Image (cartoon, helix red, strand yellow):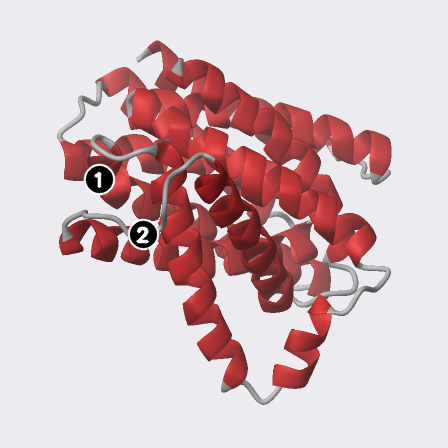
């Protein structure tokens, strides 16, 4: 069951990324992330209560603290970095950089959860990293595009590391908690923190203005429902019902869908170097799976 949820997460997330790329053309990364968290929190809490559950229940305080920390790392930090990377790289190249997510999950699962890691998986991780380096480092890297590419890749790698760290530290709580409740707690805590951050920002008027209906909603709203509600529920369910390494690998199939959709709907093109980098990264993921 966990494998199916992980695959469904990849499909819905891929469609959301294409919509977020369009939204990012008019909304800043933090503003778009704030919108995503606010809308998805309303949906998650409403779903929670419709199922007869409630947000505040008789759970250990440590569970709440772990979920809040997980959300801060994996949503506030990671998603903001992700949107910055997406804006700089485009959906297709960003998808290649996201390949580092699986190696990070396997590595952190080994370090923090004592899940096994083989030599084959280690070799696969190195290939994924090699593919990302091929994208980020190229001849003429001192020109503006080269610096943008390198910086966008850095934000993307950091986004994937914080994403992996955020979910791995929540794994022990997910083992004995409902997926919907844990997800709603994470999102609600993040929303409260983001409201505080937005309130003290010099740009607070522009940030809160995102909640006034605008043309950006045409892509931001459906992207949020797909990526921050449906995909998020499937993502956490996948982590709950199978090993984090297995779930992460299935999540990574979103790379294929994102690249395909980016070519079809965004008109993005790939150079031979980028295609080769993609193939190297996918070969690395195949080794991680076989391991």
Q: Residues within 10 Å of mark 2 (few under 14, many from 20)?
A: many
Which residue is at a point 30% across and 53% down the rendered structure image? 56
Query: Dot 2 lies on which element?
Result: helix
* CA distance for labels 1 and 2: 10 Å
Residue visible at 51% across and 53% down in the picture: 41
Q: Which mark is residue 70?
A: 2
The residue where tag 1 is placed is: 173
Q: Residue shown at 49%/87% (left/top)?
A: 200
In the image: residue 222, left or right of residue 186:
right
Residue in the picture at 68% in, 56% down: 87
Return the residue nearer the eye: 58 or 142.
58
| Circle nearer the N terminus (1, 2) | 2
> Is residue 37 placed above or below 180 in the rendered structure?
below
Q: Is residue 124 visible?
A: yes
Percent coordinates x, y for residue 51 in the rendering: 45, 34
Any part of residue 129 in sight: no
Mark 1: secondary structure: helix
Q: Who is closer to the viewer here, 83 or 267?
A: 83
Residues marked 1 and 2 touching at CB (< 8 Å) = yes
> x, y (%) of residue 63?
20, 49
């Amino acid at each position: 069951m966990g494998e199916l949820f992980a695959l469904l997460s990849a499909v819905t997330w891929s469609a959301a990324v294409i919509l977020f790329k369009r939204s990012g053309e008019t909304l800043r990364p933090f503003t778009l992330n704030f919108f995503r968290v606010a809308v998805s929190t309303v949906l998650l809490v409403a779903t929670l209560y419709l199922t007869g559950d409630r947000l505040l229940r008789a759970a250990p305080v440590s569970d709440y603290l772990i979920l809040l920390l997980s959300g801060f790392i994996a949503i506030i930090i990671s998603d903001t970095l992700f949107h910055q990377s997406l804006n700089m790289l485009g959906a297709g190249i960003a998808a290649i950089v996201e390949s580092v997510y699986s190696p990070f999950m396997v590595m952190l699962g080994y370090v923090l959860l004592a899940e096994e890691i083989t030599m084959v998986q280690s070799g696969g991780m190195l290939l994924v990293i090699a593919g990302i380096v091929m994208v980020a480092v190229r001849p003429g890297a001192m020109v503006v595009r080269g610096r943008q590419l390198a910086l966008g890749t850095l934000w993307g790698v950091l986004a994937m590391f914080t994403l992996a760290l955020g979910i791995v530290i929540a794994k022990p709580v997910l083992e004995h908690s409902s997926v919907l409740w844990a997800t709603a707690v994470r999102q609600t805590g993040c929303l409260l923190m983001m409201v505080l951050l937005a309130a003290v920002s010099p740009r607070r008027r522009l940030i809160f203005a995102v909640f006034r209906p605008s043309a950006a909603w045409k892509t931001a709203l459906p992207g949020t429902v797909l990526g921050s509600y449906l995909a998020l529920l499937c993502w956490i369910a996948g982590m709950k019902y199978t090993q984090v390494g297995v779930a992460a690998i299935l999540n990574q199939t979103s790379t294929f869908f994102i690249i395909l959709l980016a070519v079809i709907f965004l008109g993005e093109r790939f150079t031979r170097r980028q295609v080769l980098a993609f193939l190297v990264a996918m070969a690395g993921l195949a080794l991680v799976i076989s391991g």
